Amino acid sequence: MEKDDEVLEFADNSTPTELHPHADLVLVLRRGSTEPARKYLVHSEVLVAASPYFTTLLGPNFCEGHALRSETRPEITLEEDDPEAMDVLLSALHHKTKSQHNNVDLQLLAHIARASDKYRCNVALSPWVFRWLQESKHPDDTLEHGLLLMAAYLFDAKDKFPTISAEAIKHLPLGFAASWADHDILSAFPDKIIGKQVAMCHYVR
């Protein structure tokens, strides 16, 4: 069977994105019942090297690991991850990034950071993290300050977080915490960080 024919045989007719020429695994990204699934041809060794999460998932104690050892290119479904963020994350891990991945908007950056934190890829992504945080656009409003701060927090960017935090404090309104509390991503800030930001905002006013 030719490779192109094999690609066309996926049950839901979605054409997978090839991230490795010798892929041994298909990652299926599915977010809700209304969005179409995305499929990526990946290599397990890349995922294991980058992520303790995948090291465990693809190990001998989980059904996904058994499938990898007993089937030809099995499918593993990941639920509820942001598809655009996972596209960037998986592409970066496999050194298959696109030009648009060089500078991502703050909303997407925060989603990438959340995925990286979930799958514990911060070390593997560290060159990209440095670039994204270094070259990110200056936040224009309360939401964007929060997204950039959250990205630095979830990426565990200890060298960048204090600077980003200090800049945010200069511009955040005193009631910023209320606007973050109901946000999909920003509501995950620990109370300790929110409390410190609030205290510093009051201090500098």
Image (tube, rainbow, N blue to C red):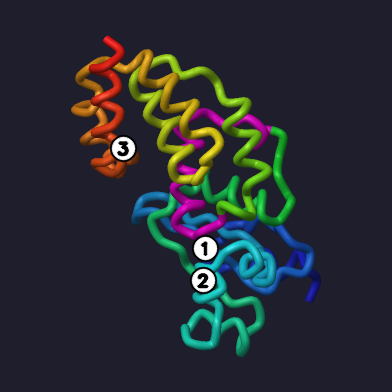
- From the viewer's perspective, is residue 170 above or below residue 67? above
Determine whether the residue tagged by mark 1 lies in a helix, strand or loop: strand
Q: Please tell me which residue is depicted at 63% across the width and 37% down the height of the picture.
A: 130
Q: Residue at x 55, y 77 (%)?
A: 58
Q: Which mark is residue 172?
A: none
Q: Earlier in the sequence, mark 3 or mark 2?
A: 2
- Which residue lies under the disc numbered 2? 76
- From what the image shows, is residue 157 above or below residue 10? above
The question of residue 103 being in magenta is answered with yes
- Given the image, on which type of amino acid does mark 2 rest? Ile
Of residues 94 and 83, the one nearer the viewer is 94
Indicate the position of residue 134 as horizontal and vertical percent values: 61, 28
Question: Is residue 187 rendered to the left or right of residue 30?
Answer: left
Answer above or below: position of 184 versus 166: below
Residues 106 and 124: in front is: 124
**Quadrant in the picture for residue 25:** bottom right
Instruction: Inspect the magenta stretch and tell me whether residue 67 lies in it.
Output: no
- Sequence-earlier tag: 3 or 1: 1
Magenta segment range?
Answer: 100-121
The reply to whether the C-beta atoms of the residues labelled 3 and 2 are less than 8 Å apart is no
Pointer 1 residue: 28
Q: Which residue is mark 3?
A: 193
Q: Are marks 1 and 2 in contact (CB under 8 Å)?
A: yes
The type of residue carrying mark 1 is Val
- Crowdedness of circle 1 by 10 Å Cα count: few (<14), some, many (20+)? some
What is the spatial separation of the Cα atoms under label 1 and label 2, in whole angstroms? 6 Å
Q: Quadrant of residue 39?
A: bottom right
Classify the position of the N terminus by image quarter: bottom right
